[in-house]
Image: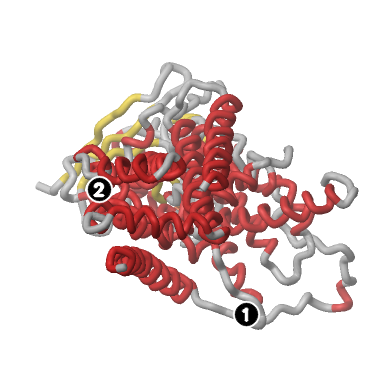
Amino acid sequence: MTETVTVRVQRYRPEEDTAPWEQSFEVPYSEDLSILDALNQIKDQQDPTLSHRWSCRMAICGSCGVMVNNEPKLSCKTFLRDYREQAAVTVRALDNFPIERDLVSDISGFIDHLETVQPWLIRSEEQPVSAGAYPQTPEQMQRYAAFSQCINCGLCYAACPQFGRDPAFLGPGALALAQRYNLDSRDEGAAQRMQWLNAGEGVWSCTFVGYCSEVCPKDVDPAAAINRGKVASDINYAVNLLNILRGKDDA
Amino acid sequence: MHKPYIQRQRADWWLRNPAYRRYMLREATALPLFLYTLLLMSGLFQFTRGEAAFLQWLEMLRSPWLLALHGLALAAALFHAVTWIALVPKILVIDTDRLRVSPAAVKLAHQVGAVVCNAGLLLLAVLLLRAAAGN
Amino acid sequence: MRRSHEPVAWSLFGAGGMLLAFIGPGLVLTTALLPWLAADDPQATHAAIGALLAHPLGKLLVLACVALPLFHTLHRIYHGLHDLHLPAPRLPLQLLCYGGATLLSAVTGWWLLQV
Ligand code: SF4
Ligand code: FES
């Protein structure tokens, strides 16, 4: 007989359910079985009505985020063998996002915040294509490289209690991306992005819980990005105050 | 059919994950440190009232309650110092074309600085009070 | 989105946090031991502290050691209460915490001018 493990999966079927509930499945165990493999086994062999998201199966598309035993994880990058001592593995939809169905979250709040911070190279004057690329040294690239590794999985949002409290908070992923462009030597948009950082819904909702950086599967360290953003916003506040005192307009 | 289930944060969210409990413990260091600051203020106030009042305050510091507060405040101050300095290199990033200091070096400098300052303060206080008593 | 005034609170919180990391444990240990350190000659301890408080730099130092930790701790307490879902609107809580820190700092400054 093959060894099995108990996987408890959160179900939510909007047609019938008013709240999520838990369903247990027995999944044949093997050393190389990921949580995603287990979910696919359940869907293919046991219950075709189970809904969950995935695409690349190799930790790059960012679509398979779920809570595994209360921690935000990419299900394709998390293996059942790491939960052998526990009696069961519990898989839920990501915290802090609306649940569309079963394990499928609606992360559009996060995506909207990403767009808010204008995550693209902003130039005061675009140079014509004929002028070639904007040059950048490896050292200059190193300054934002870590912040550019984000795959938009939303795990950091599921980890952030301040986003859980107030979904208007731009949150770790979006603020890390803002920092990624602000630190890019080719970008001239930091002044424009400052208004988003400066807001209460910007960097100032963060209390440096730091769990976002712990769960990020790409070592983006969004908590560091946000808190460096606080320093920038702090300086911006002081400069603005001086300008007001000198009779210039409030920005 | 579109009927998303909205997850609301529970008031006990911070009990449900060890990372959140550590965060709350870090924030809770503020409580004993706040009370300790009030104790410092009371000492200053008694000082303004004259020598007798101040010496009475000094004697009061021997009470078990205030020793307990000191113990709690010491634990809080140490936990605060360790967790605070661990985060400094994430906020204080020295990385310009002219000057680059690694995060590890920034952290080490703060750790050494904190040990020297804390030990130095205690040593200075002991030596000064000894010298004052000797005169 | 509107500009937040949190930078004021955060700067003071940060200064207090740095100060507490660098001298907090040493200061707590010093006052914990003070009655015993002073046991031989309490009057001399009183005089030594008096000398510290008589100097303008000493006054400034003591003010920093009281005011910055006040802003640091009350900032954390304010955010902690919000984290704990204290069912109170933000403004009165802000007035209580930051107003309290300001008031207690002012009182400390006043006392320092008395000695
Ligand atoms: S910062 Fe990390 S955890 Fe957050 S969305 Fe990007 S990759 Fe995911
Ligand atoms: S399936 Fe693409 S990241 Fe997991």
Q: Which mark is residue B129?
A: none
The residue closer to the viewer here, B128 or C104, is B128
Residue C80, quarter of picture: top left
Q: Left or right of A86: which side holds B42?
A: right
| Helix, strand or loop for disc 1 | helix
Write the residue at 68% across / 61% down: A181
Type of amino acid at the residue the image marks with label 2: Gly
CA gap between label 1 and label 2 equals: 48 Å
Q: Quadrant of the C terminus of chain B?
A: bottom left
Type of amino acid at the residue the image marks with label 1: Glu
User: How is this picture coloured?
Assistant: secondary structure
Q: Left or right of A234: which side holds C88?
A: left
Q: Estimate the x, y position of residue A247 in percent, counting from the top left.
A: 90, 48
Q: Are marks 1 and 2 in contact (CB under 8 Å)?
A: no
Q: Can you identify the residue that label 2 sits on?
A: B71
Tell me, yes or no, if residue A134 can be seen here.
yes
Nearer to us: label 1 or label 2 = 2
Residue A20, quarter of picture: top left
Q: Estimate the x, y position of residue C16 in percent, counting from the top left.
A: 50, 52
Q: Left or right of A153: which side holds A23?
A: left
Q: Residues within 10 Å of mark 1 (few under 14, many from 20)?
A: few
Label 2: chain letter: B
Write the residue at 57% across / 62% down: A147
Q: Estimate the x, y position of residue B62 in percent, counting from the top left.
A: 22, 44
| Helix, strand or loop for disc 2 | helix
Q: Quadrant of the N terminus of chain B?
A: top right
Write the residue at 74% across / 47% down: A195
Q: Can you identify the residue that label 1 sits on?
A: A139
